[in-house]
Amino acid sequence: MAEPFEPLYSADEMRAAEERYPAYPDSVPELMERAGAAMAREVMLTFPAARSFACVCGGGSNGGDGRVAARVLREAGHVADETAELDGYDVVVDALFGTGFRGLPRPDAAELIERMNAAPAPIVSVDLPSGVDASTGEIAGAVVDADLTVTFHAAKVGLAVAPGRFHAGRVVVADIGLAAAPTVHRRAAPALLSIVPRRGPRDTKYSSGSVLVVGGQPGMTGAACLTAMAALRADAGYVTLAVPESALAAAEVLSLEPVKIGWSDADAAETIVRAAERANALALGPGLGRGGQRQALVRELLERVQLPAVVDADALFGLELFDRTAPTVLTPHAGELARLLETDSDWVRAHRLAAAQQAAERFGAVVLLKGADTIVAAPGEGVVVCDLGPPSLATAGTGDVLTGVVAAFLAKGLSPIRAAAAASVAHGQAAALARHRAGLVASDLLAALPMALDGLSSDQKLSS
């Protein structure tokens, strides 16, 4: 059976893996030889027509890997110069900084990085693009924009987490003979969906997962309907959609299968609390509205409804610290997380790993920070990175779909961190299985979710 998680190594974890290798540190030249040879092989496979290579080598072990690669390329009959002069070469090999790099490149190194980026030749980075922090993905200054990164032993955190991931290009992992070891941070693999409980012969519509969705004011009723339908498509057996009475007629038209109930601001809490009595999980926020009454409703429901809950969209606006014993998942994008942390979205985008962890500790909840590198953080734990979703997910409403999937998986009894991570995998896989990428809209994901849960591959995707 395939593993549900893959390791993501920090700089310290990578150093420890090397130190565990037999005869370390005397074995360092052996490891360097393997790394450089693997690098050269991948470069020749990727650029078979290339004949000349400019190898930009730093002074550390990363530079040593680059020098070995240059030698192997020369032995194969190519021109491979260790040089900072980049004109006239077919490929540039970036071996300037390695996993130990942190902070801001020195001015001379920054100038060299900028010249590499300006060169017309493609860039191949050794282990990770120079300028990326291997342990966080953070970037403090100049950074190489690689077309290909050949990393050794296993992927690094900085290759999976933005902004570093956006500078890595295609990533290839080369085995250099190190033993595997547990890591603090992990990447979610498609096999994670195998842990999601499926309906059994003794299940009823309630025992297979009952979800209560609260939101959907007029003008945004579609958001709550998407969440409700996504919960059903994620294999929940029963979904109740609670919307303002003024939106009830629209909800009846937009979504057939969920049970619908209406509420007014005067009776909202009591109506919703009663509806929660037969639910296993609560999805709170899509299209709810942001007025003072709605913020008070969110606070009251989080305190009174002690069900596993996913809190999204409008329910995150003005969210205060809450006191509840049931599991809670917050699903912000960068802007929403910035408001929760009382900072700006640029800081969150530059420090995604730290921001998600900070919010998880602050709220005592699992935080699912949405993005190309969706990050799932829990208090006192490493994060899970879910990066299986294509860029087509960057469209309105897909977050509402994700909320419904998280709620369905919570209702089926998954722990909050596994529910959030598995939902992110299902969400990304559904987007990959949808019949098109350009022009994808959120409702396209609904038909593809069951295929994602069934484990179909993209070559079995919906046909047009």
Image (spheres, rainbow, N blue to C red):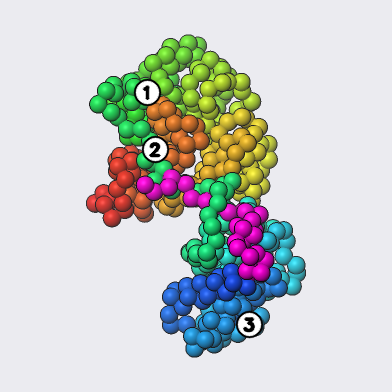
Disc 2 crowd, CA 10 A, few/some/many (<14, 14-19, 20+): few
Left or right: 272 as drawn, with respect to 134: left
Mark 1, residue position: 210
- Tell me if residue 285 is in the magenta stretch: no
- Tell me if residue 19 is in the magenta stretch: yes
Which stretch did the figure color magenta?
1-28
Mark 3, residue position: 82
Mark 2, residue position: 195
Residue 227 at x, y percent in the picture: 40, 32
- For marks 3 and 1, give the one nearer the viewer: 3
First along the sequence among labels 3 and 1: 3
First along the sequence among labels 1 and 2: 2
Identify the element where label 3 is drawn: strand
Q: Nearer the viewer, residue 4 or 411?
A: 4
Disc 3 crowd, CA 10 A, few/some/many (<14, 14-19, 20+): some
Which kind of residue does numbered mark 1 sit on?
A: Ser
Distance from the alpha carbon under mark 3 to that under mark 2: 49 Å
